[in-house]
Amino acid sequence: LEQHGVEQADNLSTQCYDRSERFLRWDEPLTVGLLISTSIITSLICLTAVLFIKNLSTPLVQASGGSLNLFALFALVLMCLSSCLFIGKPSNNLCMMQQILYALCLNACFSTFLTKSLEIALLTEFPRCARTALRWVTPSRAWLLVALCLLSECLFCFCYLHLGPDYVLPDYTSLPTEVLLTCSTASWLAFALMHGYNGCLAFVCFLCTFMVQTSGKKYNMARGITFAILIYFIIWIFFVAIFATLRTVLRSVIQIGTILMVSLGIVGTYYIPKCYILLLKPDLNREDYFQVTNHQTRLPRATF
């Protein structure tokens, strides 16, 4: 018997019955739990931003990126809020916005890490080039590098829109009595380019920071970036493995959980240790604890 719309016929039956649509609804207990988690993580990021604003001129905040920190924290807030796009009945526009907003917000955060990672790599691995190359990661030019990274990501997003954004695909086979509404990828190439670019930025940051060693009397700024990138890759490995095997409404739950865990991982490894110093160890918030002098090239002390 031919079926139309959301109707289905039982085996050996000549009548069709309506199949209800299945998606992650706003009033489900699981959704409420995810929204509470989103609120907690977003509040944590906002409180971190407030603390950094109050201490913006201190050596710790300046050494970790200055105003770039606020830009990264704002991007993390938007990324957390973008998880709400996975709740409710999906549409073609929502499916498209889910991926674009997540990719742009993550790129904004990683681009700020990139400027600090390049500075660290120049001072530790390429001291002879540091005198001339460090000028490209000064605070004013660091913003140009961030803008360039975001512009590149925007180009990949346009390719994603041109080649085929995600769209709503009704799934009649995964659930016996319901129609599962999911977002399906039209072009895996565009999807890979858009998210793979962020992965490349993260990998460059990791290469620049994972071997950096500092004395016990100095704060190791590189370690926070390394741990943040490691958590990002670990979460994505688990996400891909789990997401590929799911064919239920839990796919949206996994996507939301991944976004929240990445946001929490970045805040917890890079920003929370600095908040600890600002609040509980203010005596360490001094210039010599966050700066290093390269004696080989007689560089002026640069933030590390």
Image (tube, rainbow, N blue to C red):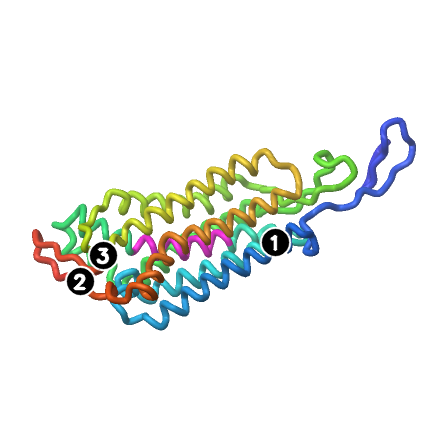
Given residues 183 and 289, the one toward you in this image is 289
Identify residue for label 2. 288
Residue 33 — which label?
Answer: 1
Residue 304 — which label?
Answer: 3
Q: Quadrant of residue 193?
A: top left
Residue at left 38%, top 58%?
A: 272
Whether residue 140 is visible here, answered yes or no, is: no
Residue at left 32%, top 64%?
A: 280
Query: Dots 2 and 1: beta carbons under 8 Å?
Result: no
Given residues 128 and 285, the one toward you in this image is 285
Distance, label 3 to label 1, CA atoms, is 39 Å
Residue 125 image position (x, y, % from top left) = 18, 46
Residues in magenta?
102-115
Give the residue type that dot 1 points to: Gly
Task: Specify whether 279 is left or right of 95.
Answer: left
Residue at left 58%, top 58%?
A: 36
Q: Main secondary structure of the magenta part?
A: helix
